[in-house]
Amino acid sequence: MNHIKKIGFIAVALTLVFGLVGCSSDTEELKLTAQQEAEMSERLAPAGEIVLEKDVASAAPVASVSSGPRSGEDVFKTKCTACHSSGAAGAPKVGVAAAWADRIAQGMDTLYANAINGIRGMPAKGLCMDCSDDEMKAAVDYILDQN
């Protein structure tokens, strides 16, 4: 073994020896203050609760507030704007009439169907699974009014 390899071997051996010395088997209990205990409990607390189907009847009812159908503008601003304002995934941009001309030429029924069922990079309803078909149509109308 040449001199450089010997030095490297010795360095690795010393590193292992000193590393193992640092990992002694002495155990010392960690003491936390009451504040640290409370903070740790808060961080480790469950984020929610799972209700199994058989427990649904005993679970507290959840109030459902229906505010009626959303406007096309509301749907656009909360669901459609991410792609149609930036052109993500090839989405035609709002306010760029040329991007919509060929689509409009196909007819409103086709535009509505594509918005509801999806087309190319756009998933069905643009992933707005809580949007009704009428809300999607209103969103399409809103988008076209912006061009």
Image: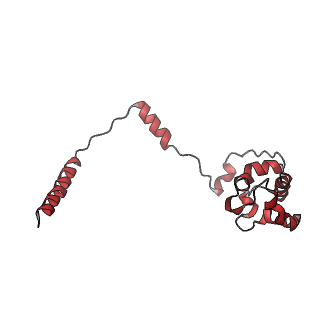
Which x, y percent locates residue 61? 72, 46
Which x, y percent locates residue 29? 30, 39
Visible residue check, residue 112: no
Q: Residue at x 17, y 59 (%)?
A: 8
Q: Quarter-wise, where is residue 93 in the image?
A: bottom right
The image's colour scheme reads secondary structure
Identify which residue, 146 or 28, lies in the foreground: 146
Question: Is 42 left or right of 95, judged from the image as shown?
Answer: left
Q: Residue at x 74, y 64 (%)?
A: 124
Identify which residue, 131 or 139, lies in the foreground: 139
Identify which residue, 137 or 87, lies in the foreground: 87
Visible residue check, residue 50: yes
Which x, y percent locates residue 139? 82, 54
Question: Is 22 left or right of 54, judged from the image as shown?
Answer: left
Q: Quadrant of the C terminus?
A: bottom right
Q: Is residue 141 above or below residue 118?
A: above
Q: Is residue 144 above or below residue 35?
A: below
Which x, y percent locates residue 73? 81, 48
Residue sitting at the far top: 34
Q: Quadrant of the N terminus?
A: bottom left
Q: Quarter-wise, where is residue 4 in the image?
A: bottom left
Identify which residue, 93 or 32, lies in the foreground: 93
